[in-house]
Image: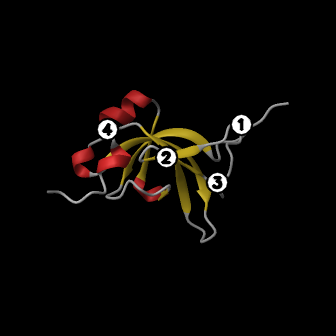
Amino acid sequence: MDVAPRYVCRQGGGRVSLRGMVPPDPQTKVSQVRLAVIFTPRTSRKRYPAGCVEIFESEEQARAAADPDNKRHAARVVGPSKSSEGQYIYYLVEWLDPGAGDHADKPAG
């Protein structure tokens, strides 16, 4: 029996389930696992609006386009999904930047 993998968000060493996420559909391009750069000042979230997510073909391209000092973090995401508010969103699977979910939300100094 095939069971779809359970996607989780890694935050500060913990795991958060992605309740409400539309699972990847192998027959369409809807809600697929993708490599991306997310523009966000807060890396503690598990959902990001499509307007903040730039999709790339490879992990190398996403890592090269990332710029953590300017709040652009490489990540693996699932989406797009349509939220209950009608917005297209991506769910964070994991950050590709080392420590992105650990330090980016803390105030400087």
Front residue of 60/106: it is: 106
Q: Residues within 10 Å of mark 4 (few under 14, many from 20)?
A: some
Q: Residue at x 26, y 43 (%)?
A: 67
Q: Amino acid at mark 4?
A: Ala
Q: Residues within 10 Å of mark 2 (few under 14, many from 20)?
A: few
Residue that numbered label 4 is attached to: 65
Q: Secondary structure at mark 2?
A: strand
Mark 1 / mark 2, whichever is N-terminal? 2
Q: Secondary structure at mark 1?
A: loop
Q: Calculate the distance from the C-alpha at mark 4 to the C-alpha at mark 1.
A: 27 Å
Residue that numbered label 3 is attached to: 21
Reply above or below: 34 against 80: above
In the image, 22: left or right of 72?
right
Q: Quadrant of residue 60?
A: top left
Q: Amino acid at mark 1?
A: Pro
Number of disc labels: 4
Residue that numbered label 1 is attached to: 26
In this rendering, which labeled residue sits more in front, label 3 or label 4?
3
Please state, as top left, top right, bottom left or bottom right, where the C terminus lies in the image: bottom left
Q: Calculate the distance from the C-alpha at mark 3 to the C-alpha at mark 2.
A: 19 Å
Residue that numbered label 2 is attached to: 14
Q: Calculate the distance from the C-alpha at mark 4 to the C-alpha at mark 2.
A: 26 Å
Mark 3 / mark 2, whichever is N-terminal? 2
Q: Calculate the distance from the C-alpha at mark 1 to the C-alpha at mark 3.
A: 15 Å
Q: Quadrant of residue 21?
A: bottom right
Q: Secondary structure at mark 3?
A: loop
Q: Amino acid at mark 3?
A: Met
Q: Amino acid at mark 2?
A: Gly
Q: Residue at x 34, y 36 (%)?
A: 98
